Amino acid sequence: MTNFLTILFDGVAYGMLLFVLASGLAVTLGLMNFVNLAHGAFAAFGGYVCAVLVNRSGVPFFVALPLAFAAAALAGVVAERTLFRHLYRRSELEQVLFTIGFVFMAVAATDYVMGSSQVFINLPDVLQGQIDLFGVGIGRYRLMIIVICGLLTLAIQGTLARTRFGARLRAAVDDPRVASGLGINVPQVFAFTFAFGCGLAGLGGALGAEILGLDPYFPLKFLIYFLIVVTVGGSSTITGPFMAALVLGIADVAGKYYVPKLGAFVIYALMIVILIWRPHGLFGRTVAR
Amino acid sequence: MRDLLVIEELRAGYGEAVVLPRFSLNVAQGEVLALLGRNGTGKTTLINSIVGATRRFAGRLALDGRDITRLRPDQRARAGIGWVPQERNIFRSLTVEENMSAVAQPGEWDIAKVYELFPRLEERRRNFGNQLSGGEQQMLAIGRALVLNPKVLLLDEPTEGLAPIIVDELLAALRRVTRVGATCAIIVEQNARKILGLADRVVILERGGIVHEGPSAPLRADPSVLERFLGVSGGAGTPRDPA
């Protein structure tokens, strides 16, 4: 029982981390109809920025996290303005080829600059070890992940549903031509959203380095996970990917614990069943909120 | 009165197709202009060209003395073009109130004033765009353009497909709106006779050019001009979408 609760806790932490990593992809894919397979490259970038700041420059971990967000968001702006925006009106195959090529370039560049071995971020003492809660061992680091990712999820949801920017984004997605004719600078709204999604990925990469492992192949290794979160969750909502990320996180942790050799089989079998059973994802295509 | 909107030698269309070969028109401050014509004569293309949503081959547009020819649609909207599109195009995943707050610009018109004009919208303020009747959608489309606080209001077939009682309500509201302040309005209508009471001037289009232009008062007394160019005496269309 204790074991089960610990697995559930680890699974939730893993799932929420996956959600923060993939939520930017949910936005670009679901709202802007852009298939960005390079999303993980921004996550890795954030992770490496955090590692360099903490390990080499001695910046405190909690200061490095927002900087990782900012660095990945800035990289997102540059990539979107110079490269990706040329592909918005192209076919999905072209978008896939373009962005997967970008991933391989990112992998090679990271290997060249940072080396191929796995990078670990030196964590402050306060995040190490476990605390005991009603007899259940709870990892401090995973607890922090749940708190930060939970707050971020609420912030994303609130921004989309309650702010003027969220309304302008939804308007731009509903009907870009009319939104533009009514004074909304649609490309600017999309560019900002894209950058924010990349920033979230960068923050996820920094938070996830400890749990997921960070090496140059990170963008490829976790690409499938991001895509599962978005397709299984349905890319037109934010709640859908959130639930899908939780299910995936718990199933992955439990699978690896109980049937280590079949872990991957369980995940992909689940994905295939869901995609056949609900072609538009677990939560269907509804209004973005 | 000075001219608020000036269109000079405009040549515009879509892709390679030219719909308006050479179009010029001035609209004065405070003026309400009815734009009439059969289907496919270029009325909507003209509206869309003022918005900036068509391809411009030549010509220029000025709004309140400022050249807006090279502005993007969103810049034109912020410069003072208030667009009520033909299909209404309410943002379906936004509530009634968000449809307005998402685009509102500071000025005389705010959401509270729109609710005064259309109390129905206030009752439905938390409903989403896809839950509204045709008449409510049209009220919202007009309210959404008003909170932009435009200098020129462009209404593309505002009464199309609405029940007669809703049409009367809308026209009454438009009369109140267009009698205030420094705005002017261009109203595209099929419902020619109904709009004559609202408009100061009538322009009739045929094949992308103006075939009749003049004050609306004489046409009210003698509708033969309407019959000649529109083939109808301004009969009301069949309502197909009662509110």
Image: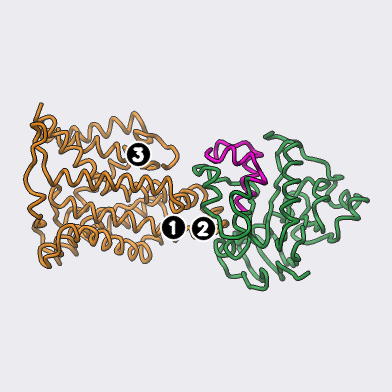
Chain colours: A orange, B green
Q: Quadrant of residue B148?
A: bottom right
Q: Quadrant of residue B97?
A: top right
Of the pair A185 and A163, the residue shown nearer to us: A163
Of the 4 image quadrants, the one containing the N terminus of chain A is top left
**Label drawn at residue A239:** 3
- Disc 3 is attached to a residue of which chain? A
Q: Give residue A257's position: percent from left, percent from top.
A: 10, 34
Amino acid on which the number 2 mark rests in the picture: Ile
Give the Cα separation between the discs numbered 1 and 2.
8 Å
**Label drawn at residue A189:** 1
The span picked out in magenta is: B116-145
**Label drawn at residue A184:** 2
Which residue shows up at 30% across the image and 60% down it? Answer: A73
Q: Earlier in the sequence, mark 3 or mark 1?
A: 1
Of the pair A136 and B158, the residue shown nearer to us: A136
Q: Earlier in the sequence, mark 2 or mark 3?
A: 2
**Label drawn at residue B182:** none
Magenta segment main secondary structure: helix
